[in-house]
Image (spheres, rainbow, N blue to C red):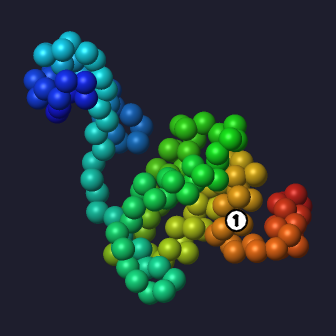
Amino acid sequence: MRCPYCRSERTRVIDTYRDSKGGIRRRRVCIGCENRFSTYERAILSSPLVVKLDGTREEFDRDKLARGIRIACAKRPVSAADIDRLIGEIESTLRSMGKAEVSSRVIGDLAIAGLKDLDHIAYIRYAIVYLGLDDLQAIRGEIDRLLEG
């Protein structure tokens, strides 16, 4: 592990924590510059291929999903921990399906369902893009459905 401050490869682990998502957080100190930093390790498990609407396939990209959800939650009272939990739940659900390929629609449905529980404004922001709500009447209809349920 390289030190992010001086780029030295001589670091030492001070402390190790296991989290509920199956990751390991390590607190480290650089032998060279004596600065401390944390690293996070997560197991790399096989993820399904995502079948997009046009029929193309690509590897599941956790960062791409996170970007979309973070944009929807921008300037909302949603903690980073809640966003990470939602992304982890979606990823876990995809893996538990045990399929080699999964439709992008399934991922979008999981994201929109999670956002609906997390924050209604973030849900509407995501729905505008995901559901293709391209006029005010469609957006109003979605808001009305949200308020009814």
Considering only vertical position in the picture, is 40 above or below 6? below
Residue 125 in sight? yes
Badge 1 element: helix
Question: Looking at the image, which residue sits at the far bottom?
Answer: 55
Q: Residue furthest top?
A: 34
Q: Residue furthest left?
A: 10
Where is 142 relative to 38, above or below? Answer: below
Q: Residue at x 88, y 73 (%)?
A: 137
* Picture quadrant where residue 34 is located: top left
- Judging depth in this view, the residue of 126 and 43 nearest the camera is 126
Looking at the image, is 140 positioned above or below residue 20? Answer: below
**Location of mark 1 (residue):** 127
Of residues 101 and 126, which is closer to you in this image? 126
The quadrant of the picture occupied by the N terminus is top left
Q: Position of residue 83 (x, y in %)?
A: 56, 45
Name the one closer to the observer, 63 or 22: 63
The residue under label 1 is which amino acid type? Ala
Q: Position of residue 81 (x, y in %)?
A: 53, 37
- Residue for point 71% across, 48% down: 119
Residue 22 position within the rendered picture, expressed as x and y whole percent measured from the top left = 35, 42
- Asked whether residue 13 appears in the rendered view, the answer is no
* 69 sits left or right of 55 in the view: right
